[in-house]
Amino acid sequence: MRLELRGITKRFGALVANDHIDLVVNPGEIHSLLGENGAGKSTLMNVLYGLYSADEGQILLDDEVQRFAGPGDAMAAGIGMVHQHFMLVPVFTVAENVMLGHESTRAGGVLDLEEARAKVREISARFGFHVDPDALVEDLPVGVQQRVEIIKALSRDADVLVFDEPTAVLTPQETDELMGIMRQLRDEGAAIVFITHKLREVRAVADRITVIRHGKVVGEARPTASDAELASLMVGRAVELTVHKDAPQLRDNALEVTDLEVTGPDGQVLVDRISFTVRGGEVLVIAGVQGNGQTEVTEALLGLQENVSGSVRLDGTELVGRTVRQILQAGVGFVPEDRNEDGLVGEFTIAENLVLDRTDGPPFVRRGMLQLATRDEFARDRVAEFDVRTQGIETRVGRLSGGNQQKVVLARELSRELRLFVAAQPTRGVDVGSIEFIHKRIVATRDEGVPVVVVSTELDEAVALADRIMVMYRGRVVGIVPADTPRDTLGLMMAGIAPEDGPGAPAGNDGDEGDAA
Amino acid sequence: MTATTVDAPTPDTAPRTASTATWKAVIGLGVVLALYALLLALVPHEGAARFRLATDSDFVVLPTLVVPAMTTAWVCGLVGLAVLVLAAVRTRAGHRVPVWAIAVFAAALLVGFLAWAAAGSPRDLPVVGLLSGALALSVPLIYGALGGVIGERSGVVNIAIEGQLLAGAFTAAIVGSLTDSPWAGLFAAVVASALVALVLGMFTITYKVNQVIVGVVLNVLVIGLTSFFYSEVLVPNAPTLNSTTRFPQLPIPFLEQIPIIGPVLFDQTIVGYLMIVMVFVVWFALFRTKWGLRVRAVGEHPKAADTVGIDVIRTRYRAVLIGGAIAGLGGAFYTVVSINQFGREMTAGAGFIALAAVIFGKWDPLRAALAGLLFGFATNLQNVLSVVGSPVPSQFMLMLPYVVTLLAVAGLVGRSRAPAASGTPYTKE
């Protein structure tokens, strides 16, 4: 089926999320929609899927104008969507999830689960998915959950398939497999829309590329275009994609983590006795697919986790068992994974957010009173130094873009005397321009002789920033390897497979494989 | 890159899990057992306890069971101790304490306590009366809990069960009195309770007001309205407006003559039988039908339901209304089954106990019904013991159902997981 979008416009108040967007996707074609976070890709797809109604414009399928009042209509018309955040009910089985919304029933509305199971088996066999129809979705790895999403779409005979940022949660190998599946679907005649901001994937799989910026189509490109060309089209100016840094100048100060174990509220082991050392002047990137214990490691370093055992020594001082305040005073800077949840108070101004952690004494508080003049002067300096694009320091942080919010967090954390810097996903949801800046600041911190720990799920970022890469899988360290390790090896490590002859960095501690569980 | 769909080899590194068993259950059982032993030791109650097992209509008349009170009580205590030891051993080995062990423990201590309490009393302890009364008292609790389960499964917390029961009881009294038909009263109760549910739905689903607040406010509103109309309208016109005809008992021939269970189970009114059927119907509807799948989907992950074309708002409204209607049946129990007139605030917190049964029953109709039975039993135990002449002050006995509720909800039986989106209004972004 041929999909055509004509002049789609969607406004949210004053913000124009989609501005007269035209797009054509032919059967047997993978059409990639490339754009930064916030460029309007997802809005466009939600319009297509009937979740939003467009203010202007038309959706045509095989040249017939469609009216979608809701996702049900879009699905009935043959549009299937694989959502970025899976739209699966975790406590349902695969078969129940697949049948939901178009259940086949026997007399009296009784569910015919057998038919749904057969359907799952049939589609899974066709694509070699190995999905058990009776497995609970919450027990499945994310890669398999995504296949359930695909089965869900195919079980409704979708001819147009939309993949919304499908690779965000996958290992490189799983990503390759997904690309294989997309090609297979294309060869069977499906029209595929592939939404992403990852240039590598676009070039690997797309037949055509449309680039969106600030809600407008800014151009089309061929898959043969270079990364630099695509990036400059996406951002609107030439961008530096590589991080420039010199060889690390190692110092004597160090973060030493020994046998760190973190358990969750239900007793599940989230971080399984890991050990590593980061010397002053180097960046250790903790890589891995999201949810393999990286977040918990950073939170344990800052004292935010409850059940922690083992030892974390910063320049010889033990941090485990100390309060968050004591750890901050020991000189730890921390960029949390979710800035809106843990990093900033959205309703507070930039100035207020910048002094959030300094309200216990001079210079910002004297005799229990906020020193507003000092604070504002400090805030103005930081805003200038960290290039926060804003109308002023009185702007509420919640109104800033992701990149500028992250700069505020960074400004607060880096403007103290640091002896350790921990950044979790520092560039998630941040525009390419700000990513450049954030990377530069992280490297500058390292060059000042501070040990730096960065968590990243993006392999490109890990390779670019790291002096050494520590890969985690299911709470354990698979290995600690130099940054120039081949991507394939890193990808396998992210799936839990240790490199055969671990080249191991000198200071590295090669995980904890001999586990006595 | 090839189009491979073969799974990468998965290394055998399943995440380790530390022992999930907690000592909560063991400590809880230990405390209860210690209190029990203390009671027996400090207040010994010599004499014989007489348990009457028979009623007049049984075909085999069981003899009245006479046992030496203190011996029985201590033997039951030993059974409890055995269970405690077993539980401790299981916990030590990293296992959970099985539910049957807790049931055996509770039953043993209960029998022991009854023997102690009834010792030396001139009256027999009527076992049949104890059980059938428990079932009767649990009828409104179970209807209320079923209504609550359906609402919460769809994502709407129903704090207003109390209000729904009360509205049902009030309306059934008036309509039942005016028409002289308990059926009309029952129907009116269903409508009234569904109306309360409709208001709950409007505020929580459409206007997205905090569900707990709306529920509490509705309870207060219904209590206020019914109390006002009771004293202003019903009391002056009691013969015409507040004097219903009750549903007759419908004993099932032969079955009702079976000793003990016959008079307990097979001598109910239509509302009682309907309740037993309803428990299974609600369970089947929730877990085996298209409607149930959609209700549960909407309560767990409304956005996922929306993206497959399910109307979240309508599904929630329907569930809340059905839940309200079922709770209304429980309300009618008060005025067209139990007694024949309405009294001010006559539900006396039953709606909140039903809410506890929903949680204690882990949002499952069958378990919630069992929880309702337990609470009904606790209430009736207090009634029966005060008749027999229990040595425990009646004020303490009155606390019993609430203590049981508190212990139950505090999680003696393990953690329960609510529907993920329960209490959260659905907003399309």
Image: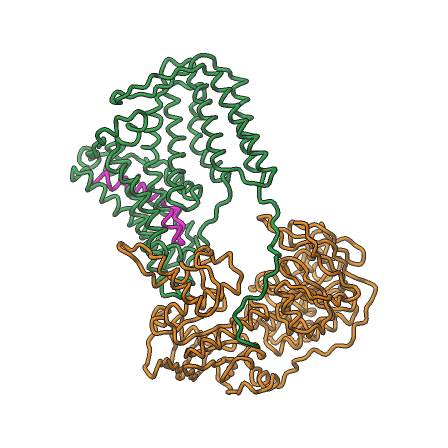
Image point (42%, 50%), residue name: B213
Q: Is residue A411 at least partly visible in the picture?
A: yes
Q: Position of residue A488 (x, y in %)?
A: 64, 72
> Is B151 part of what is drawn in magenta?
yes
Where A400 falls versus B368 (above or below)?
Answer: below
Relative vertical location of residue A339 with respect to residue B382 in this rendering, above or below: below
Q: Is residue A338 left or right of residue A132?
A: right
Is B165 colored magenta in this rendering? yes
Q: At 39% across and 81% down in the image, what residue appears?
A: A3
What main secondary structure does the magenta stretch of the protein show?
A: helix
Chain letter tied to orange: A
Q: Judge by depth and name the residue closer to the eye, B55 or A212.
A: B55
State the colouring used for the structure image.
by chain
Query: For residue A397, what is the image quadrant?
Result: bottom right
Q: Position of residue A372 (x, y in %)?
A: 66, 64
**Drawing shade for chain B:** green
Residue B114 position, x and y percent, is: 43, 22
Give the farthest residue toward the right: A252
- Write the start and end of the magenta stretch as one range: B149-176
Across and down, in percent, residue A361 comes to: 72, 57
